[in-house]
Amino acid sequence: MTDPLPTGAIIGILGGGQLGRMLSVAAARLGFRTHIFEPGANPPAADVAHAVTTAAYDDVAALTAFAKAVDIVTFEFENIPTDALDVIEAITPIHPNREALRTSQDRLTEKTFLEGLGLNVAPFADIANAADLKAAMQTIGAPSILKTRRFGYDGKGQSRLRSVDDAATAWADMAGSPAVLEGFVDFSIEVSVIAARSASGDVACFDPGENVHRDGILHTTTVPARLSAAQRTDAVLLAAKILNALDYVGVLGVELFVTPQGFIVNEIAPRVHNSGHWTQNGCTVDQFEQHIRAITGWPLGDGSRYADVVMENLIGDDMDRVPALAKQRDTALHLYGKADVKAGRKMGHVNIIKR
Amino acid sequence: MTDPLPTGAIIGILGGGQLGRMLSVAAARLGFRTHIFEPGANPPAADVAHAVTTAAYDDVAALTAFAKAVDIVTFEFENIPTDALDVIEAITPIHPNREALRTSQDRLTEKTFLEGLGLNVAPFADIANAADLKAAMQTIGAPSILKTRRFGYDGKGQSRLRSVDDAATAWADMAGSPAVLEGFVDFSIEVSVIAARSASGDVACFDPGENVHRDGILHTTTVPARLSAAQRTDAVLLAAKILNALDYVGVLGVELFVTPQGFIVNEIAPRVHNSGHWTQNGCTVDQFEQHIRAITGWPLGDGSRYADVVMENLIGDDMDRVPALAKQRDTALHLYGKADVKAGRKMGHVNIIKR
């Protein structure tokens, strides 16, 4: 990376969902302009972007024009087709880098990478067919979870095995997709670390947040998490190890299970993360701005927390609660402007300040 | 006002400067979309807006199309041509209302209005010509300030009189514009109250901020201001009196001089105000969102402060300090994306959290 991008530079963002939307607002706060690339019409990010390209990820002409129109490219989700990235990268740099994307796009690659760093992960096995699953059940056993290697999020592409008898059904659920069997981890709490690494190799982490899920989707993140000072330090060192190993530039989300034997890494996400939304109201530099700073070659910001926060996702019909939440004390509303309310769809979140 | 505007509704904003920009971001946070009307090219607000109309305020066709494309109209500055407002208001409601605009567009009307409410203002006199000024100097004396009745901001259109001898020069400075002579007020500090009134008549005020000016332009706002509890209450009651008298809907800035004899109202601004920028990092609902809530018929938000803040404007060459400020602890940068740095031009601000 050379000089920092100057104010006025244009940041291309692949994906126009709520993460792209909040990245765009953060970029504007630093004087940058954003250009959203998104196949779907009227994406949430378009309401707060300088420019929008509506095109498919296999539209080479659109990808080329997009890459030429921007100074740098980043993304809000990890499952971007490799061919699209190839087209863009021939023209404009992409941050975080391709290796980080490749690693996190595939659960097997990711777990192997983390294990290679000496970090603890749940017992896992590569499952290419029913026979693999049968064999893996001998060692990993039940309860366990079968997950597709790619394209899973918010509990999608997962099947729980309560006993060996569930194996056939679980494998059928994968519909032929390569999968990973993960052993059950007996954890007390799940926390996540939102970590950033700058172009010059500096690392900064926000305070870990404590996550509660419902139906496989993040429900709340509470900061501070119930961790000891030693655990906080461990979490930061662990995140830094991952960032450095990937020569990462940008924000990375790391989900950790807290167990009596220490942290077990659940998964990493090479992007801003739902469990980091609390930073919008708890820190002067939030995760979105931190990501923009990193990828533009700016110094990382001071992510120290000046307020305790509980972030709660608004999912599907939770939108009915907005009129009441709008009147609630110490509550910051963040709605995504999605036209259609659907069950399981992330529609917004609230950050509630705790005094 | 009828039902609250639903998420997805489009808010028209007259003016595409930094206030329109920050209003647009706040509107998006509630799921609204914005449409900016601005004569100048590439206005700061365009980077974070759903739609932009670039046209002059006397372009009736453009004003008509704009008014038809939005659900409600608001503005970021008070000096909008009356004819433009007439075109828009025939199609779409404007908040705050025309009476509030009319009152604050003219210093003489404003001071007469405030005095009529029983509030204290500096001694003033209507100056239409050199003879008026000569006569007024007999009663108001020097030091005093001659100000154009209309179109003044950030110290522009003002001339100080240190003695009667300055009268001829001061009047010449007005270039024939109708003016007001204001007597000098011996104040200890200047504070401002950012007050909001909802469509249903509820009033909410942010904590008063203490302002310091440099060269006629706001330099810093510090919250909390050095006021007693009784003074804080007085300030809120005073602001509420103004809002109610104007049947006001939206956010209003009220600048007050603190004197041994009580508050003297310096001026009011029928819009979000530079001295309210601190709310972006001190409150869960900032002044921009509060304004959007009011004009869309939403309930006013909880504007209680959860952090002490010093807001400092970045003017002209202050942009050279951005690299250092980006590294400074507890400092939130808010840049406006203006391409050209000019002396006296507001380029951004920082909100610094005080612990």
Image (spheres, coloured by chain):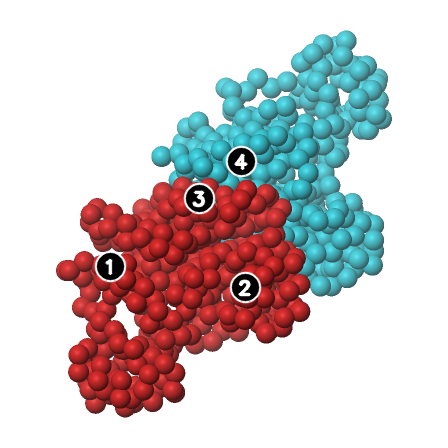
Chain colours: A cyan, B red
Residue designated by label 2: B14
Residue designated by label 4: A322
Residue B76 picture location, percent across and down: 49, 62
Q: Is residue A11 left or right of residue A126?
A: left
Residue A323 picture location, percent across and down: 51, 36
Q: Which SS class for mark 2?
A: strand
Distance Cα–Cα, label 3 vs label 4: 18 Å
Q: Quadrant of residue A305?
A: top left
Circles 3 and 4, Cβ within 8 Å, touching? The answer is: no
Q: Which SS class for mark 3?
A: loop
Whether callout 3 and callout 2 share a subunit is answered yes
Residue designated by label 1: B118
Whether callout 3 and callout 4 share a subunit is answered no
Distance Cα–Cα, label 3 vs label 1: 25 Å
Residue B183 picture location, percent across and down: 22, 74
User: What amino acid type is highlighted by mark number 3?
Assistant: Ser
Mark toward the start of the polypeptide (3 vs 1): 1
Q: Which SS class for mark 1?
A: loop
Chain under disc 4:
A
Chain under disc 1:
B
* Picture layout, residue B57 above or below residue B246: below
Asked if one can make out residue B232 in the rendered structure from this viewpoint, the answer is: no
Whether callout 1 and callout 4 share a subunit is answered no
